[in-house]
Amino acid sequence: MDKGKIVSIEDRIPKLKHQRRKKANRRLIMLLALFFILIASVVYFQSPLSKVRKISVSGNESYSYEQIVEKSEVSFQSNVWKISRKEIEEKLEKLQEIKNATVGVNLPNTVSIEIEEFSRLAYISSGKDFYPVLENGNILGEKQIDEIPVNAPILIGFEEGKVLDEMIDSLEVLPEVVINSISEIHSKPVKTDVFLIKLYMNDGFEVNATLRTFSEKMAHYPSIVSQLDPAKKGVIDLEVGSYFKAYEAEEAEEVELEKESEQ
């Protein structure tokens, strides 16, 4: 062997000691860092910094901010790290008018609650009171109003059951412009057809229909009305075909739909 390349043990010992000292220092630094992180975590969890500082609620119309927060059971004493979003969502979705609830935790200390409510498709008339009917068919018996609603049709003569369910299903698929044009819907059952209804429109026309074909035919209402003289009010019969009879006329005249409205 080349004697010039031989390194004695005495020469290597200082280098080995230096390397060991560096490794020991790195371990000590890592342990100290971990220790301070643990201390900081304990202090953080015990301090007001980990408490909820802000609760935001959006999408709520039927329930107030205070009602949503109370039902969620989130408070400014809650620890932001202990909040279960799923549990809060389940609590909120038990409320009759809430269709969906989404809860988010935005660090460092904000909780956001986004609400999606069932829409009110109509109102059930009961004496002088009106009860909202939701898009899922539920009637809000505890939320009556004593003023005539202007933002949805009034249902008269309906009771919970298959006829009301069919009515709600039909309203769900109608264009909003058509729903907004309806003032009242009366249930007019007969032995041969329990689904017969009469509508009073905001434009002064009346409509006779059956729920078996109501949504399909009523979707063409704007097209039908456009073919009529707005000054000549009467009854539009959609039970079989499409017919119009003016109040002062003796015979009905058939209303033919344009092809564009049938597509």
Image (tube, grey):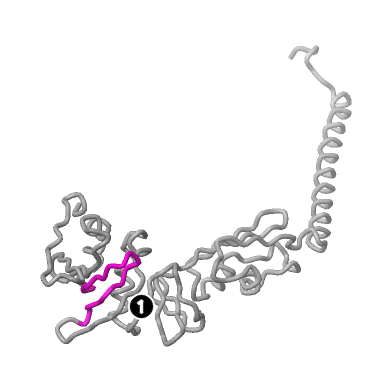
Tell me what residue is drawn at x 26 percent, y 76 percent.
198
Question: In the rendered view, does 46 fall on the left or right side of 244?
Answer: right
Q: Which is more toward the observer, 59 or 103?
A: 59
Q: Which is more toward the observer, 263 or 226?
A: 226
Q: Quadrant of residue 209?
A: bottom left
Q: Examine the structure image and report whether residue 230 is included in the region drawn in magenta.
A: no
Q: Which is more toward the observer, 65 or 151?
A: 151
Q: Main secondary structure of the magenta part?
A: strand
Is residue 137 depicted above or below 263 in this figure?
A: below
Q: Quadrant of residue 217?
A: bottom left
Q: Position of residue 214 (x, y in %)?
A: 23, 68
Q: Position of residue 98 (x, y in %)?
A: 50, 70
Question: In the rendered view, does 211 fall on the left or right side of 9?
Answer: left
Tell me what residue is drawn at x 14 percent, y 83 percent.
192
Tell me what residue is drawn at x 24 percent, y 82 percent.
188
Q: Quadrant of residue 62?
A: bottom right
For the record, the magenta segment spans 194-211
Question: In the rendered view, does 66 fall on the left or right side of 116?
Answer: right
**Count of marks placed on residues:** 1
Q: Position of residue 208 (x, y in %)?
A: 22, 73
Tell me what residue is drawn at x 32 percent, y 79 percent.
164
Q: Quadrant of the N terminus?
A: top right
Answer few, some or many: residues within 10 Å of disc 1's Cα (few below 14, many 20 plus, some between 14 and 19): many
Q: Report which residue position mark 1 lands on.
A: 155
Q: Examine the structure image and report whether residue 207 is included in the region drawn in magenta.
A: yes
SS category of the residue bearing label 1: strand
Q: Amino acid at mark 1?
A: Leu
Q: Position of residue 246 (x, y in %)?
A: 19, 68
